[in-house]
Image (cartoon, helix red, strand yellow):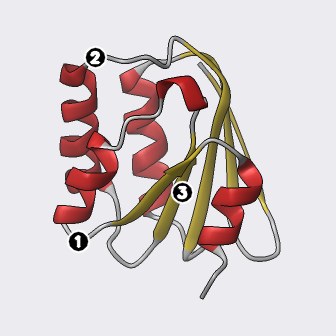
Amino acid sequence: MEITGDYKKDFWYIKATGRFDIADIAGIFQVISESKQPKVLIDCLQLKETNISYKDRYNLVLLAEELLNKEISYVVIWPKKDINFFWVNNASKFGLRVNIFPKVSAGKKWLLKD
């Protein structure tokens, strides 16, 4: 998985391409949790193999609880055909401000609403 990042005016934009890899996602979570930027958008639209198992979704919840900062808002842009709110619903139960959208424009709108 290839990961690039760019600080925009109001948020940190992260783009992931290639094949889904949970270890790489853990790395992204660790880096962005230490950010001084209070808003992060992770664009996974170019990622392949995004119809992940519930085991991987559960492991992403555990990684989010362990690594993500509750003071930061996170939005993930995910291919529409593979969106499942399991991760969002469960990460939110741990007090994380997260959401998922199929389009960057919708995710950006949610992220910047405050």
Q: Nearer the viewer, residue 102 or 42?
A: 102
The residue that appears at 60% across and 70% down in the rendered structure is: 110
- Is disc 2 placed on a helix, strand or loop? loop
Q: Position of residue 114 (x, y in %)?
A: 60, 88
Q: Are marks 2 and 1 in contact (CB under 8 Å)?
A: no
Choose top left, top right, bottom left or bottom right for residue 84: top left
Task: Give the class, few, some or many, for how many residues have Cα within 10 Å of label 2's Cα (few <14, many ≥20).
Answer: few
Q: Residue at x 22, y 23 (%)?
A: 54
Residue designated by label 1: 95
Q: How far from the left and from the top, in percent, is residue 50?
A: 49, 19
CA separation, marks 2 and 1?
A: 24 Å
Dot 1 crowding, Cα within 10 Å, few <14, some 14–19, many 20+: few
Q: Are marks 3 and 1 in contact (CB under 8 Å)?
A: no
Residue 33's tag is none
Could you tell me the amino acid type at mark 3? Val
Left/right placement of residue 16 relative to residue 35 reads: right
Which residue type carries mark 2? Ser
